Image (tube, rainbow, N blue to C red):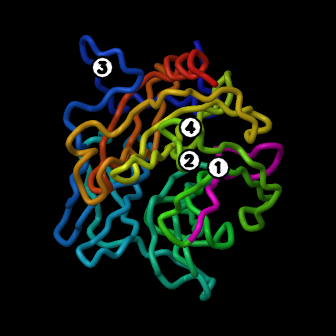
Amino acid sequence: MSTIISNPTSIPNLPWQERPAGCTDIVWRYSQNPVIPRNPFPGANSTFNSAVIPYKGEFAGIFRIDDTRREMNLYFGQSRNGLDWNIQPQPIQFQCAIPEIAPLVYRYDPRLCWLEDRYYITWCNGYHGPTIGVGYTYDFQTFTQIENAYLPFNRNGVLFPRKINGKFAMLSRPSDNGHTPFGDIFYSESPDMTHWGCHRHVMSPDLSWAWTKVGACAIPIETSEGWLLIFHGVLTSCNGFVYSMGAALLDLDQPWRIIARAQPYLLSPQTLYECVGDVPNVVFPCAALTDGDTGRIAIYYGAADTVVGLAFGKISEIIDFIKTNHK
């Protein structure tokens, strides 16, 4: 049985639904999906690609919401059970002492990571093109933005939940200024969460459901088998991009080294809410909650760039799936 190391805390109220009778899927969908609708308040066009984390016995979330002007921004929400959400109708106002990067251009696809003494938020930030914005909060009331992590162009900035060899560590995907038709995952490290370097290649697309590009998704989960990475892969079909969810194991001390990468996907767009929406055929996870006592995992994912879905699994089964089906 694989054990979670970096998140041994019990989450007794982790959202959970048992695997349906007759289902053999490694990851299965919540029967009441979508768990968050496209318009949780007036003026919202879509809610998707959002981050969730346990907070004071309940749950906090940073949500990507595109409004009816199609302005992309981040909103705070809270929930007692991880299923029923109260999302504030006004976007987060970041305190930022850096006038060059403070103005809003766009913010989207956030990730949330508890690291040392605070909750870090990373997102795709508009600054002469997409780059990785970084901020933090102690209490989900005051939010502070610090320096962008990289030059444009970059997306999918995902922090590791602890320092590695004494350095902060992040995965990202260098890209371009458009709807990138390529992309590999890279590892970077920083002594101070400001200066990022020592870049290492992690993962490339392959001749499969991840043919076109790959990107890190949820915060990596430290296990006795390695870092469990939930990532997305993109296939270019005759009808456009298809986004699916996959899994891999990375070395604990050198996370740019892949131990194993599952060839089949974990979840692909197959339901109506995943296949029909503002951007069809998208499963895009941004958060994975894990319960250290049971090894259960709850994965929040954007569906068709319109709503938020929820899927469930077990850490040990996902790791066995990777090891059994690795390249």
Q: In the image, is 104 to the left or to the right of 23?
A: right
Q: Is residue 224 visible?
A: yes
Give the amino acid type for the residue marked by disc 2 in the picture: Val
3D distance between C-alphas at marks 1 and 4: 16 Å
Give the amino acid type for the residue marked by disc 1 in the picture: Ile
Question: For the residues carrying marks 3 and 4, which lies nearer the camera in this image?
Answer: 4
Give the amino acid type for the residue marked by disc 4 in the picture: Leu
Residue occupying the point 37% across, 49% down? 238
The residue most toward the bottom is 99
User: Closer to the camera, 169 or 243?
Assistant: 243
Q: Does residue 183 lie above or below 309 as drawn?
A: below
Task: Name the residue beneath numbered marker 2.
Answer: 214
Question: For the residues carrying marks 2 and 3, which lies nearer the camera in this image?
Answer: 2
Residue 18: which disc?
3
The residue most toward the left is 42
Counting from the top left corner in percent of width and height, residue 253 is at: 79, 35
Q: Does residue 80 lie above or below 141 as drawn?
A: above
Q: Is residue 81 magenta?
A: no
Task: Name the residue beneath numbered marker 4.
Answer: 207
Number of marks drawn: 4
Between disc 3 and disc 4, whose residue precedes?
3
Task: Name the residue beneath numbered marker 1.
Answer: 185
Q: Which residues are magenta?
A: 160-176
Give the amino acid type for the residue marked by disc 3 in the picture: Glu
Between disc 3 and disc 1, whose residue precedes?
3
Secondary structure found at label 4: loop
* Neighbourhood count class around disc 4 (C-alpha, 10 Å): few under 14, some 14–19, many 20 upward: few
Q: Is residue 55 visible?
A: no
Q: In the image, is 191 to the left or to the right of 22?
A: right
3D distance between C-alphas at marks 2 and 1: 6 Å
